[in-house]
Each structure stands twice: as structure tokens, then as C-alpha cells.
Image (cartoon, rainbow, N blue to C red):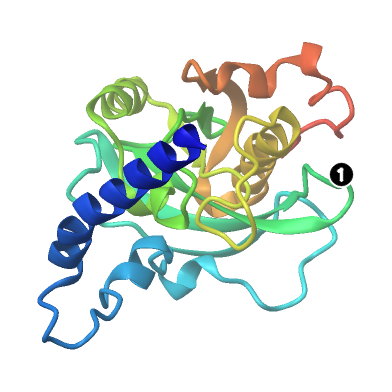
Amino acid sequence: MRVKLLSSSLAALGVAALAPLAQAASGPASGPASAPASGAAASVTEAPVPAFYRWTDALPEKPGVILRREALEAAWLPQNAQRAFRILYTSTDGIGGTERVPVSGYVMIPAGTPPKGGWPVVIWAHGTTGVADVCAPSYRGLGKRDLAYMNGWLGRGFLVVATDYQGLGTAGAHPYLLYRPEAYSLLDSARAVLSDATFGATRWCSSASRRGRGRVSPRHGCIRNTRPISR
């Protein structure tokens, strides 16, 4: 009985001690009840990206088709980029493995005249930038390390195509760290550039950040089940 009384007393003292703190947190007792902060919903609601990233029409059956593009003029572009474009292209849904999805990315073209046969292409697999649409590199820009890579390749006469990955910028969830969705996004970005003669692109090779290395590795089963990339 004494234990029960002691517990009840301590509980009552605890509630009494916390009451002033609760009153202070909620505001003066005479004032109106505090309403939720107007910015509370905005803190968990993803900021919108431009309409460029939204595709509502039917998608071509073929992966690697340019859906739209626009000139990319941004302060973060490397100095060796003569021209740059933001692109939206078709890819294969890496979750189900059959449906087509729109994926965004960007293309940077080096200065000068293309060599005979066209520009050689570097496909860039970026590292972690976030999972919200506004984290798409084609929208938010690049960090210093990635810019140094891009500038080096462009200076050596390589055209660079870089995917944002499925669901990063475009509709749907971004399947972060899943190899197949990101591998499809990479390979189909190459198809998109090579199949569009206006980019003047030819043979390709791949390069990746630490996160992106596995995306183009045959040991993960991402490449051997796709059709060959050709111009």
C-alpha cells in the first residue's frame, strides 16, 4: 500500500512540475490556442520542379528516345562546355522491368569541331544527391568534384551525357541504391544521345562516382539483359 501511495505521489509531483513547462510551450493561458505553424506542411511537402520534368503523353515503346530538350544555361556549367541541354528521354522501369518511364538528365558538348565520325561520349553516373525531385543534378547543378571531372572530359573532346536516374526529377519514387533502375537510366541516356544525330555523338564509354560504379557492372545483371547500344 505504501508503495502505491508513494508512486501516486511521485506521479502527481511529476505532473505538477511539468505543468508550467507545458503552459510556457503552449503560450499564455489567456491567449488563444496555438495553431500549427503555417510552414509545417511545407516542410514535408516536396518543392515542385519545372514543367519540363513532367510528361503526361503516351511514351514511345522504344527506350532511349528523346522526348524533349531545352538549352541549359546555368552559372554552374563547366567552362569547357560549349553548349548544354537538359533532356527528357524514355527508359525502362527498373522496378517492373517492362514498362517505359520518362527520365531526365543533361548533355554537355565540348568546344570545337566534332572529330570524324562524331564526338566520343562519356556516360556519367552521379553519386548521392538526395531523393527529392529538386535534387536532380540537371536541376540543382553539380558540386566541385563533378564539375572538375566534366571539365576534364570536355577539354579532351568528350561529349558528356548524365542521367538524373529514374524518379529523380521525374514522377514516381526514386529507387535509391537499386542497381537495375539506375543501370537502365544510364544505358538509355547513351541510347538517347547516340540516336539523335543533332548531338553529333558516336562511340561511348562509361564513368562513375563511387555510388555509380555498380550501375554499369555486368556482375549485377543489369547490362547483359539489355539490347546492345548502337547509334
Q: Quadrant of residue 184?
A: top right
> In the rendering, at what x and y percent does residue 124 appear?
50, 29
Which quadrant does the C terminus fall into? top right
* Residue 9 vs residue 52, the one in the foreground: 9
Task: From the image, tell me which residue sits under label 1.
Answer: 97
* Residue 108 vs residue 104, the one in the foreground: 104
| Figure check: 195 above or below 53 | above
Disc 1 marks a residue whose amino acid type is: Gly
| Figure check: 115 above or below 43 | above
* Residue 105 vs residue 109, the one in the foreground: 105
Q: Quick check: 155 left or right of 99?
A: left
> In the rendering, at what x and y percent does residue 15 appear?
30, 54
Q: Quadrant of residue 89?
A: bottom right
Q: Residue at x 55, y 23 (%)?
A: 212
Asked whether residue 74 appears in the rendered view, the answer is no
> In the rendering, at what x and y percent does residue 48 appear?
41, 69
Sort mark 1 into few (<14), some (14-19) or many (20+) by Cα contacts within 10 Å. few
Q: Residue at x 60, y 50 (%)?
A: 197
Q: What SS does tag 1 mark?
A: loop
Q: Residue at x 60, y 52 (%)?
A: 167
Asked whether residue 212 appears in the rendered view, the answer is yes
